[in-house]
Image: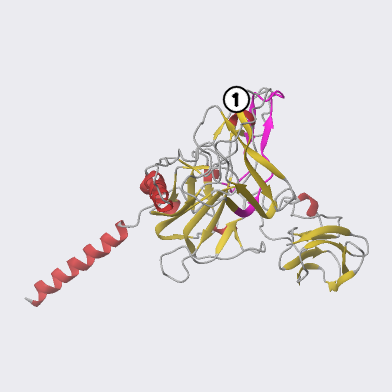
Amino acid sequence: MMKRLSTIICSLLVTTLCSFVTAQSPYIDKVYDFLPAPGQFVNELPEYEPGDTRDDLIRKAEEAIAHNEQGLISLGGYGGYVVFGFDHLVENQPGKYDFKILGNAFYAASNPNGNATREGGSCEPGIVMVSYDANGNGLPDDEWYELAGSEYYQPETIHHYEITYYKPDENKIPAPDKNYPFLNDTTYIQWTSNQGDYGYVSRNVYHSQSYYPQWITDETLVFEGTKLANNYVDESGTGSYYVQYAYDWGYADNHPNTDKRSGFSIEWAVDGDGNPVQLPGIHFVKVYTGVNQYCGWLGETSTEILGAEDLHLTGGDVDVPTNPPTNPPTNLEGFENLPGFNGSFNGSVRLLQNPVRQQLIIVSVQSQQTNVYNLIGNKVMSFPIESGTNHIPCNLSKGLYILATENYKIKFLKQ
């Protein structure tokens, strides 16, 4: 009897263990948040119906992209995002692509200028962030880390970019473009940014619904993150043929799903100051549209998402061909040939991350005295820096300042 009971218990344990193992799905399990920025596919992908709440749209986004359904959701213009998670830890395996994000990017079949050196077509790059469930509560409320793609350290990339969209008056008199009849309101939705610029999300004849998320009652929408340089080129010169060129690696909806560069390595994770972090794995992913650009009749660039998968469970965890350093080298010899950083460089010193928030990050080839002046010439900071990377606390009030060494000056913005 005891032997039989032991056999039954063992059988139950094996069954339970097998059920636990097979319960791990390689695909998105849940969508936790979804908020697109204004765009021509907003309220369509997924569809908004009168009376829908934000929870309804999150549910609809989940129904579209979770469990390998491969429906399509649009994140709208710059900053629009989706947050989703897996039902298990996606492991960080060194040197491997750990997960893939599916989009609808494709390369152009032809290029009127014959530019065969760049891959491009409809490539709408989205910034990818990841989070590890450190507190174990199953919710994406722990710290987020950006995956530093190929453009993270480029001087054209703006970190801590903030954009504000203003809810439109749907009954206002439209301002059509006389030269491009497909644009029937060029001042439809206004936006401003913390960089001092502004513009509009234009309305086109192909999409007549509201471009502002209708379940949001707020008069403004604010998004913040990393903004990549524009990736489109009007190859026709007349506004009739736009090519959105792919960045090298590290962005969603940037390469076709069949390309291994639609995969991501958790090793690329960096903190808010650009320092690499080591994570055992991740549970949650956030994707947001990473460019703020308008491409004529194509409309705004908007990242689209179809799904995501754990490559360790689907067998697609191939080696990452190259893993460029995601932290600045301490020896600047040959530095100008490496991926650039956000700031200026004169061959001996560089200021990283401009605008500045809590600290000045300065890379120097030598020890030297450094001063900071306000715009009327008053010295407001003075400190020595060493050879290598220096992290200097910066408690200055918001505004413009000048950092100066013996042979180097740069204007920076303190936020």
Q: Position of residue 261 (x, y in %)?
A: 55, 44
Query: Is residue 273 toward the left or the right of residue 14 in the image?
Result: right
Q: Residue at x 59, y 65 (%)?
A: 277
Q: Is residue 368 visible?
A: no
Q: Position of residue 215 (x, y in %)?
A: 46, 48
* Vertical side of 1 occupied by 74: above or below: above
Amino acid type, label 1: Phe
Identify the residue at the far bottom of this view: 2
Q: Where is residue 67 in the image (x, y as percent from the top left)?
A: 36, 48
Tell me, yes or no, whether the highlighted magenta stretch contains residue 415: no
Q: Which stretch did the figure color magenta?
A: 223-251
Q: Name the residue under label 1.
A: 182
Q: How crowded is mark 1: few (under 14 residues within 10 Å), some or many (20 or more)?
A: some
Quarter placement of the N terminus: bottom left
* Vertical side of 204 occupied by 304: above or below: below
Query: Is residue 332 toward the left or the right of residue 313 in the image?
Result: right
Q: In the rendered view, how is the structure colored?
A: secondary structure
Between 321 and 105, the one nearer to me in the picture: 105
Q: Where is residue 166 in the image (x, y as percent from the top left)?
A: 61, 47
- Residue 183 figure quarter: top right
